[in-house]
Image (cartoon, rainbow, N blue to C red):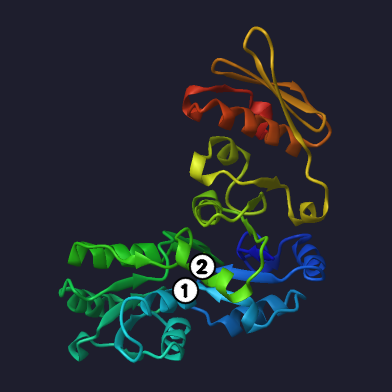
């Protein structure tokens, strides 16, 4: 089973990322492919139709959204049929209703819970309703996700995390979170798709990779989105990917073996493919550079991660991250 993030992995803005559609189409011939998104503003059918525009064969059942994970989380907090204050758009309201809850937009209706997700139409009035309902500390509060920013056509804009923070400032407590990097969305995906050998693909270390690692799912970082070689080298223990790929063509290529050794003087060596990185003390150097720069990055990351030392205390060869 292959689970994949969307923005930065499948598409960027309006355009499909090179090789992504072909690689995922090929993967679908031998494995179930599921699409996982923190975007709570769109319904699964909307996401599926968007992906079909790129040439992928996708149905709504192939998509798991943070709204669905949030509704699943709600079901563990309040009984089915409860009245729930929904702070969000159609993508969230529809899912909450389908889960068997009664939707309201007013705190005056004494909701049993509040669920909050992103919508570009949200304003002060809706956030205030959430604050009024959450003044009762016994009312559960679910956030679909805590993404601080979202990429839009004109650039980077505030995400759901900023709107949740506004309510937090008013009520002095935090919600339980359904989306990446928290477990509920991964649990929802595993429950939906099954499979004994899942693999999760993402482009962000702090949400995609950390979340997959915490859920016990092997992870793939592709360098087609947010995080790049510098961030890979600096990744903390919980955010380190199992595999690092230049793009999704790597899904269908053999992954190179990592060879570790240590010299008598304490110099540690890591070789991946035809590239070798050495580390002695706090000094990390590219000893041999092969034809594939990804192998150099993989070797450098392994050497740094194995050391247990923080990146800011190391003298790292710029060749490892494409610097000069």
- Which residue was labeled with disc 2? 187
Earlier along the polypeptide chain: callout 1 or callout 2? 1
Residue 167 in the image: x percent, y percent? 25, 68
Residue 30 in the image: x percent, y percent? 81, 68
Q: Which residue lies furthest to the front in this view?
A: 196
Left or right of 112 in this view: 116: right
Q: Are marks 1 and 2 in contact (CB under 8 Å)?
A: yes
Write the residue at 56% across / 52% down: 209
Q: In which quarter of the image is residue 44?
A: bottom right
Measured Cα–Cα span from mark 1 to mark 2: 8 Å
Figure check: 124 above or below 261: below
Q: In which quarter of the image is residue 33?
A: bottom right
Q: Residue furthest top?
A: 265
Q: Can residue 88 be seen in this view?
A: yes
- Which residue was labeled with disc 1? 69
Q: In which quarter of the image is residue 104?
A: bottom left
Say what secondary structure mark 1 lies in.
Answer: helix
Residue 28 in the image: x percent, y percent? 77, 70
How packed mark 1 is, by other alpha carbons closer than 10 Å (few <14, some 14-19, many 20 or more), is many
Q: Which of marks 1 and 2 is in front?
A: 2
Pick whichever, 32 or 51, lies toward us. Answer: 32
Write the residue at 75% across / 25% down: 276
Say what secondary structure mark 2 lies in.
Answer: helix
Q: In which quarter of the image is the N terminus?
A: bottom right
Residue 207 in the image: x percent, y percent? 50, 55
């Amino acid at each position: 089973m292959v689970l994949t993030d969307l923005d930065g992995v499948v598409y960027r803005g309006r355009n499909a990322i090179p090789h992504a559609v072909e690689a995922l189409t090929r993967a679908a011939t031998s494995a179930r492919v599921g699409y996982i998104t923190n975007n709570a503003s769109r319904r699964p059918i909307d996401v599926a139709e968007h992906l079909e525009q790129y040439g992928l064969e996708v149905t709504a059942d192939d998509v798991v959204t943070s709204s669905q994970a949030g509704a699943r989380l709600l079901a563990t907090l309040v009984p089915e049929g409860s009245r729930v204050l929904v702070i969000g758009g159609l993508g969230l309201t529809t899912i909450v209703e389908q889960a068997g809850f009664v939707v309201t937009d007013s705190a005056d209706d004494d909701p049993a819970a509040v669920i909050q997700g992103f919508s570009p139409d949200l304003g002060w009035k809706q956030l205030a309703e959430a604050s009024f309902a959450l003044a009762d500390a016994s009312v559960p509060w679910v956030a679909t996700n805590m993404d601080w920013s979202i990429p839009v056509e004109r650039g980077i804009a505030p995400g759901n995390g900023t709107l949740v923070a506004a309510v937090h400032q008013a009520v002095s407590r935090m919600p339980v979170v359904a989306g990446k990097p928290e477990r509920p969305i991964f649990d929802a995906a595993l429950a939906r798709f099954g499979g004994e050998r899942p693999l999760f693909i993402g482009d962000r270390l702090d949400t995609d990779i950390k979340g997959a690692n915490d859920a016990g799912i092997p992870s793939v970082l592709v360098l087609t989105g947010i995080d790049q070689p510098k961030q890979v080298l600096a990744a903390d223990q919980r955010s380190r990917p199992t595999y690092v790929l230049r793009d999704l063509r790597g899904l269908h290529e053999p992954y190179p073996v990592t060879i570790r050794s240590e010299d008598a003087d304490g110099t540690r060596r890591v070789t991946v493919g035809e590239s070798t990185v050495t580390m002695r003390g706090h000094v990390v150097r590219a000893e041999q550079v092969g034809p594939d720069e990804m192998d150099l990055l993989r070797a450098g990351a392994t050497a740094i991660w194995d050391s247990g030392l923080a990146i800011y205390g190391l003298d790292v060869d710029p060749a490892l991250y494409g610097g000069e």
